[in-house]
Image (cartoon, helix red, strand yellow):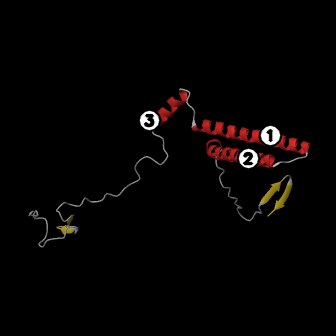
């Protein structure tokens, strides 16, 4: 049988295992270990998204050695899938012209048209997604514009040489 440790820091009476005891203004766990005071967290540390000196120098060294940047890869993918979609569209048009000249459309023609339309759609969707991913690297977001009218003067809007007072 194990004997429990007695601790003089506790007030009289045996606290339960999970109970927190307060003695002489300080708080203790039931095993006698003092509970550390929580320090308020301040606005310290690196801001979210900030680049450290090491990661910046590693990225610069990578580019100097001829490495591709993510935007380069996204641009190449966008161009590739755009060109692929255009190739499929040209194949589809030539196949339809051929079928129109023969005057006959077979189930094989319909299956090929369906395949080409699906391939065009997939290529264009991937190209569009690459363009969406690239946009923040190339174009700044437009700030919202606030129009203020100061004083009693009417707001003057000029559009193509036509004035309109509001």
Q: Label 2: which residue?
A: 115
Indicate which label's residue lies in the foreground, 1 or 2: 2
Tell me, yes or no, whether the two marked residues, 3 and 1, touch with CB atoms within 8 Å. no
Q: Label 1: which residue?
A: 90
x, y percentage for residue 96?
Answer: 85, 44
x, y percentage for residue 91?
Answer: 79, 40
x, y percentage for residue 100?
Answer: 89, 45
x, y percentage for residue 129?
Answer: 65, 47
Q: Residues within 10 Å of mark 1 (few under 14, many from 20)?
A: few
Residue drawn at 86 percent across, 52 percent down: 161
Report which quarter residue 2 is drawn in.
Answer: bottom left
- Alpha-carbon span between mark 1 and mark 2: 13 Å
In the rendered structure, the answer to whether residue 90 lies left or right of residue 66 reads: right
Of residue 49 and residue 16, the one placed in the foreground of this image is 16
Pick the quarter of the image with the N terminus: bottom left
Residue drawn at 65 percent across, 39 percent down: 77
Element type at mark 1 = helix
Residue drawn at 73 percent across, 46 percent down: 115
In the rendered structure, find residue 8 and report the number of the disc placed on it. none
In the rendered structure, find residue 54 and report the number of the disc placed on it. 3
Relative vertical location of residue 155 with respect to residue 134 in this rendering, above or below = below
Of residue 134 and residue 166, the one placed in the foreground of this image is 134
Element type at mark 2 = helix
Q: Earlier in the sequence, mark 3 or mark 2?
A: 3
Indicate which label's residue lies in the foreground, 3 or 2: 2
Q: Residue furthest top?
A: 65
In the rendered structure, the answer to whether residue 158 lies left or right of residue 148 reads: right
């Amino acid at each position: 049988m194990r004997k429990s440790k007695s601790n003089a820091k506790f007030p009289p009476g045996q606290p339960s295992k999970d109970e927190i005891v307060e003695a002489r203004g300080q708080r203790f766990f039931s095993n006698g270990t003092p509970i550390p005071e929580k320090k308020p967290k301040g606005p310290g540390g690196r801001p979210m998204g900030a680049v450290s000196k090491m990661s910046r120098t590693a990225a610069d060294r990578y580019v100097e050695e001829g490495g591709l940047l993510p935007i380069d890869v996204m641009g190449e993918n966008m161009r590739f899938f755009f060109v692929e979609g255009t190739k499929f569209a040209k194949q589809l048009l030539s196949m339809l012209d051929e079928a129109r000249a023969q005057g006959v459309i077979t189930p094989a023609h319909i299956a090929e048209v369906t395949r080409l339309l699906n391939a065009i759609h997939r290529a264009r969707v991937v190209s569009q997604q690459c363009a969406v991913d690239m946009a923040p690297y190339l174009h700044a977001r437009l700030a919202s514009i606030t129009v203020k009218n100061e004083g009693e003067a009417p707001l003057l809007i000029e559009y193509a040489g036509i004035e309109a007072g509001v």
